[in-house]
Image (tube, coloured by chain):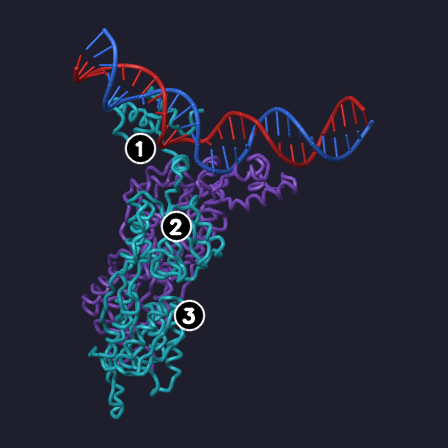
Chain colours: A purple, B cyan, C blue, D red
Amino acid sequence: MQHQRPKIVDVARLAGVSTATVSRVLSNPDVVSAETRRSVEEAIRQTGYRLNHAARNLRHRRTGGVVALVPNLSNPFFSQILAGMAAVLAGAGYNLLIADSCVMGGEALLAYAEPSRADGLIVLDGSLPAEGLRRRVPVVLACEWIPGIEAPRVKIDNRAAARVAVEHLIGLGHRRIGHVMGPPGNVLSEARLAGTEQALAARGLPPPLVLPGDFSLDSGRVAGAAWLALPAEQRPTAVFLASDAMACGFIGEVQHRGLAVPRDVSVMGFDDIELVSHMTPALSTIRQPREAIGRRAAECLLAMIGGEAPEGDIVLPTELVLRASTAPPVTTPAIKSHEAGPARL
Amino acid sequence: MQHQRPKIVDVARLAGVSTATVSRVLSNPDVVSAETRRSVEEAIRQTGYRLNHAARNLRHRRTGGVVALVPNLSNPFFSQILAGMAAVLAGAGYNLLIADSCVMGGEALLAYAEPSRADGLIVLDGSLPAEGLRRRVPVVLACEWIPGIEAPRVKIDNRAAARVAVEHLIGLGHRRIGHVMGPPGNVLSEARLAGTEQALAARGLPPPLVLPGDFSLDSGRVAGAAWLALPAEQRPTAVFLASDAMACGFIGEVQHRGLAVPRDVSVMGFDDIELVSHMTPALSTIRQPREAIGRRAAECLLAMIGGEAPEGDIVLPTELVLRASTAPPVTTPAIKSHEAGPARL
DNA sequence: AGGCTGAATGCAACCGATTACAAAAACCTA
DNA sequence: TAGGTTTTTGTAATCGGTTGCATTCAGCCT
């Protein structure tokens, strides 16, 4: 009948000490005399004792876990952020739990915000009910956020980044510029649109042609079709899309219909997901430091769990990455050079 | 001083019953009389009582969590499997914890296999030490697996799928076929290679030109460079790569160097990640039912946690997806038709 | 009326660690 | 050597629910 998991009293008995001493060896070895410690360690080895986390957590009134609330786990954009968080949290002895808002109702999600389920919460989804997050565990918002909520945010300057992207297009000589938005109401969508408009207005250019989207590949494809459907002389010569995924869909659609990027249209993405540097043409885009976002969010949360006052917002830098999908517009419509493709021999 | 979280005795006191009764209302309402139940529920509402999971888990000797061991979270291939698992597990009231073997040593990973940390384990990484997984929690292996371990596997028939892929290339008329492998030693790499060899041998064709890889985008790029470095007449006219990511890298490299797919080389991938249908050319590939893999693995694990005998291996079907990256080889080297590109006008 | 059955509830022992407090031991100092 | 520290260890309460067993009581049968 010795197939029970050994508990702390079994170790104590074998070592001839009290459970308190064993516990001290485990969590605060310095207060135990060297000799006792050795014999306890030996007893632990002999019994094959392993600590029961549920019991420790109960006593400590904590859970040892942090929940990440993700909208749509299958989106590769998020997985890299999660990887950053996982690294930090694992180092601090916390478990990373993930909850996909795609597959759970808002009700079920809020259950995660309870102190008995997790010690903290990182929200990556801006479309949650702002209610119910009050008076619960520490919360950090990353990337997207919920306007009503009072919590530190780890983010980038979306508006400025969009401005930089569009200024690049303007600098290349584009005058008719399109913008494909993220989902309506989303804070990121709004900020990127605003940046686009600002950049154009600052140069005295007309506002962008705005097409709807939702960050997904397929919405980018649809936007591509919409662009193609325009009369050629009304088409923006450059399009800035609010996500790389949409940019891929857009380019795919345009290419499948026989046009070329950047010859017929310059395309600019947002995110710099790994794949887009390998496409043809390689995508010009705005790099978000995804891993760092995850890291910082986790660090910030750990600090709050540790009792520190929440920091203010953390704004991480973005980077303009120029590749082959953006080029000067083929002007001089008089010549109508249909052969002038991208320099590829 | 009423800012304490209410506990079960507070509810009991308010409702005028014992804690046992409150507990029954919570977990086994049928044995409580309707009247008592109502008054307890009312007390719960008034106090704002919330169950403490750590306490319940301690008593139940379970954790309510399942760990997924992933090699490299940032890989989008895995995130969709995780999404499937998350859906099933959330439905059954389990938390999904993720551990990225990239960021943790094998030691730390095995700590997750302890009953006090998780009720079960889904391993997606075939490169783990087979030891230490014995005499622990229930385990299910998905996709990749560890040869030494006795546990149900959720997988596809990699060899047959590779055979189908290569037969397609042969059917198109290709005779010199290349294969870019996954990481050496990996069960998937070996099976896909074996399938490739079988298909060729069955038709009496010479064995494939095998190039090394590791499933990553960049290793695909390197393979592309290696292919380009071959004398043109030795180059395989079709290449089958063991992952879509590698196929993307390969195509990118080939295109950046001025050649075209499938005109100069047909390319076949494996996985059917979402993006590849939007590339130009759209990638022909083998579709893995990633979400289903995640689901089935989770279901299987839940059954084992519930005490059922482990099922045998579960083999899910794959599908040959034909798109634009594969085409008949441009034979008749006498004509050397350099202009015959893909039909694109 | 006495005895029996079964439903509803309470008592108190758990689950397995942690830790405040007290007791004991060891070490100093005058 | 008595008295005062400091270090080490043990005792027992505690974290917050759950559940086997005992008890109570209403309803039913003979």
| Same chain letter for marks 1 and 2 | yes
Tell which circle, 2 or 3, labels the residue nearer the N-terminal end. 2
Image height of A235 relative to B211, above or below: above
- Residue for point 25% across, 85% down: B330
Taking the spot 25% from the left edge, 57% from the top edge, the residue there is A213
Residue A337 in view, yes or no:
no
Observer-nearest of B219 and A172:
B219
Q: Chain of mark 3?
A: B
Q: Which mark is residue B67?
A: 2
Q: Amino acid at mark 3?
A: Pro
Chain of the residue under the numbered disc 2 shown in the image? B
Q: Quadrant of the N terminus of chain B?
A: top left
Per the rendering, the mark at residue B184 is 3
Above or below for B209 versus A175: below
User: In terms of secondary structure, where does tag 1 sit?
Assistant: helix
Q: Earlier in the sequence, mark 1 or mark 3?
A: 1
Q: Amino acid at mark 2?
A: Val
Q: Considering only vertical position in the picture, is B120 above or below B211?
A: above
Q: Position of residue A304 (x, y in %)?
A: 47, 42
Q: Are marks 2 and 3 on the same chain?
A: yes
Neighbor class of circle 3 (other Cα within 10 Å; few <14, some 14-19, many 20+) is: few
Q: Quadrant of the C terminus of chain B?
A: bottom left
Which residue, given by chain and number where applicable, does mark 1 sit on?
Answer: B27
Q: Secondary structure at mark 3?
A: loop
Which labelled disc corresponds to residue B175?
A: none
Q: Are marks 1 and 2 in contact (CB under 8 Å)?
A: no
Q: Amino acid at mark 1?
A: Ser
Relative to residue A154, is residue A265 drawn left or right? Answer: left
Q: Residues within 10 Å of mark 1 (few under 14, many from 20)?
A: few
